[in-house]
Amino acid sequence: MRLNLDLLERWLSGWSLARGLPLPRRAGGGLVVEVGLPEQWRRHVFVDAGAALQACAAQILQHRVFLKAAVDVETLRQALPPRWTIERPRYLMHRATPMARAAPLAAGYALQSALEHGAHIIRIVDADGQTAATGGVVLHQGTAIFDRIETAPAHRRKGLASALMHALDAVAGDADRLLVATAEGRALYLSLGWRQLAPYSTAVLAESQPGDD
């Protein structure tokens, strides 16, 4: 699969739909989502850290505006002035076909499903009904976007993350699959037959800057 702005738009559309946000729009050689949350006002997404991203960054003075690009953290660091904070690396990942049949869920756990905004949410709960693992998948224009996959620390190393991914994968059907992984999650997804398309790095003006009202 070729990494381009169309692919990033597919990913970002699913991310937005899962949160009830406006779909991304194209602007300045990249994509923009008006997030509008106190912790994140807006995000700009680019294929690389070239002239388009740098021109966008030069115009941003407001804090809590995020820049994202399919490059490694060092490339993004070198492309931006020091006032930008670079976050931990993530990875854009892809799978074209359904995963193999899952192993049974560990004893004492159960699956629950729900719809939230545009996402199919699956939770694994323990015997007390507490959430042990959760994740979502959005189906949009032939793509299944996996999002917010998480296992609670007390429930790790019990096969729950793998069981959760298989449950989400069943929802995806024959759609193309995309997700963005943390460094920790990447190893799991590789073991499940996903492949890494590109690094995916983030910069943010986390604190007030001169001229910020």
Image (cartoon, helix red, strand yellow):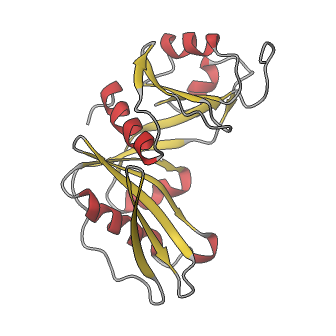
Left or right: where does residue 81 sit relative to residue 165?
Answer: right
Q: Position of residue 81 (x, y in %)?
A: 69, 17
Q: Is residue 157 above or below residue 37?
A: below
User: Does residue 172 appear anywhere in the picture?
Assistant: yes
The image quadrant that residue 54 belongs to is top right
Q: Is residue 10 above or below residue 172?
A: above
The image quadrant that residue 165 belongs to is bottom left
Looking at the image, which residue is at 31% across and 58% down?
193
Which is nearer the eye, 42 or 73? 42
Left or right: where does residue 136 sit relative to residue 177?
Answer: right
Which is nearer the eye, 183 or 141? 141
Q: How many marks?
A: 0
Q: Position of residue 140 (x, y in %)?
A: 28, 43
Left or right: where does residue 185 sit relative to residue 98?
Answer: right
Looking at the image, which residue is at 44% across and 33% down?
22
Quarter occupied by the N terminus: top left
Q: Is residue 53 above or below residue 102?
A: above
Q: Position of residue 72 (x, y in %)?
A: 53, 33
Q: Position of residue 82 (x, y in %)?
A: 74, 21
Looking at the image, which residue is at 74% across and 21% down?
83
Quarter occupied by the C terminus: top right
Which is nearer the eye, 211 or 30? 211
Which is nearer the eye, 170 or 129? 129
Q: Kindly give the residue lying farthest to the left in the view shown.
A: 174
User: Does residue 67 appear anywhere in the picture?
Assistant: no
Q: Is residue 17 above or below residue 73?
A: below
